[in-house]
Amino acid sequence: MLDTFAMFDDPTDRTNLLLSYADKFKEVPPTVAVRPFDRSHLVPHCESEAYAWAVRQPGGTLKLYFAVENPSGVSAKALAAILDRTLSGLPASEIAQVDPEIVERIFRQNISMGKGLGLMSMVQSVRALAKAAG
Amino acid sequence: MSDIASRGYADPSVLVSTEWVAEHLNDPNVRIIESNEDTLLYASGHLPGSVHVDWTHDLNDPVRRDYITRKGFESLMSRIGATPKTTVVFYGDKNNWWACYAFWVFQLFGHRNAKVMDGGRLKWEKEGRALTRDVTSITASKYKAPERKDKPVRAFRQEVIAHQQKKGQLVDVRSPEEYAGTRMHMPDYPNEGALRGGHIPGAKSIPWARAINPDDGTFKSAGELTDLYVKMNKLNKAKPTIAYCRIGERSSHTWFALKYLLGFKNVRNYDGSWTEWGNSVGLPIEK
């Protein structure tokens, strides 16, 4: 995934790629969580009001789920879709190793410092969920 | 009389309704500009014919903490196909917070022919109006801008210090928690690095979003704004006033409300704001 993003130097191409992931975002199903969501799953410091869950799968892997309550939170939806596609199905121990710095490599010029920190917090939340499940 | 004209604003010409914008989407003398916090939001769907101005990359100097130069502004205006005669209309997310910020930066270069779409994206979307992902085709224009003129609308650190020492009017538009110093960033936002919490001594705490009707993002009426700023918080329209927040974005929204909607005679935005004041050695802080 990071290699794919590395190939997109042009800001417009990168924006379109990110947008394509945001379009693929699927909210957490009611079988996993329903509103009002448990605040313990709220990603801290993310202004898009994102929530994250990690559900253990047969075989010991994890499936990640997200909700993004801010309808304008397009970047958070894009990152949630990317994290789901790249990390779901991996063992908890591997997910717990994901580096929050990937946000910089994925979004590059598409984020401000504040938003970057909020998105990194999404990755940190996923790491914490994986560690707790491991 | 339109709804905006009936609200009693000092200068109602700076606000246009979503209806007005819908009627001017194809007006060659009007350029609709979207400015958001999330830079992907414009690409995910925008007003037909609108252009994107990104607050980080288009309005700020790429290296030092400052705004673009005259040359940068000319380049930006050329890119969006605007001339000095073009009416620019800003809109965006977060109750037009970033739209007002962009409006304010445009005033540093004296582009007076500028307006804000009342209600921003929220109202436009709630009304079910069209959004598109079509790339707006723009013919680059030639724009000759004057040198940036900060003084009328922008306050710098030394000016704020002098203003504070004279017990001048200061408006802290951050959240009550930031004002009290119990947190150094907005609720649910990351900390962008102030070493000390609190507020500039003497500043009134009036969170920026109190100027907005939360249901549709429109500005409150002049009467309601007068109640908030003048009656409740004892701000005097005739006295010099400085608004600040964290980096000058939220306070540009309050600057807009005070200057144009209430007619404050001398109001400036301190864009250094708390990330400068709260990091400066020796400056007075109140909690």
Image (cartoon, helix red, strand yellow):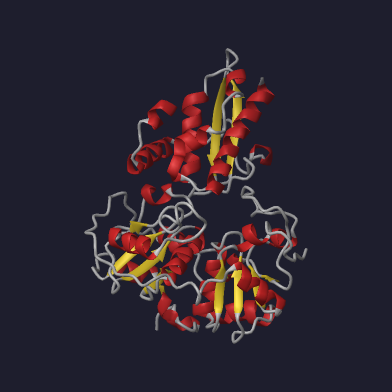
Numbered circles on residues, count: 0
Answer above or below: position of B203 versus A54: below
- The residue shown at (48%, 64%) is B101
The residue nearer to you, when weighing B99 against A51, is: B99
Residue A59 in the image: state x and y as whole percent. 58, 12
Where on the picture, by quarter, is residue B231?
bottom right
The quadrant of the picture occupied by the N terminus of chain B is bottom left
**Is residue B220 in view from this perspective?**
no
Residue found farthest to the bottom: B238
- Left or right: residue B153 versus residue A45 is left
A85 left or right, relative to B185:
left
> Going 63% across and 25% down the picture, which residue do you hit?
A130
Measured as percent of width and height from the top left, residue B53 is found at: 39, 57
Q: Position of residue B26 (x, y in %)?
A: 24, 65
Residue B13 place in picture, x, y as percent:
40, 79
Residue plotted at (55% across, 24% down): A63
Residue sitting nearer the eye, A105 or B222: A105
Q: Report whether B99 appears left or right of A28.
A: left
Q: For residue B121, which quarter of the picture?
A: bottom left
Establish if A55 lies above or below B240. above
Quadrant hosting residue A9: top left
Residue lying at the far right in this picture: please name it: B287
Who's the residue at 28% across and 50% down the image?
A: B134
The C terminus of chain B - image quarter: bottom right
Q: Is residue B159 visible?
A: yes
Looking at this view, is A82 or B245 the one in front?
B245
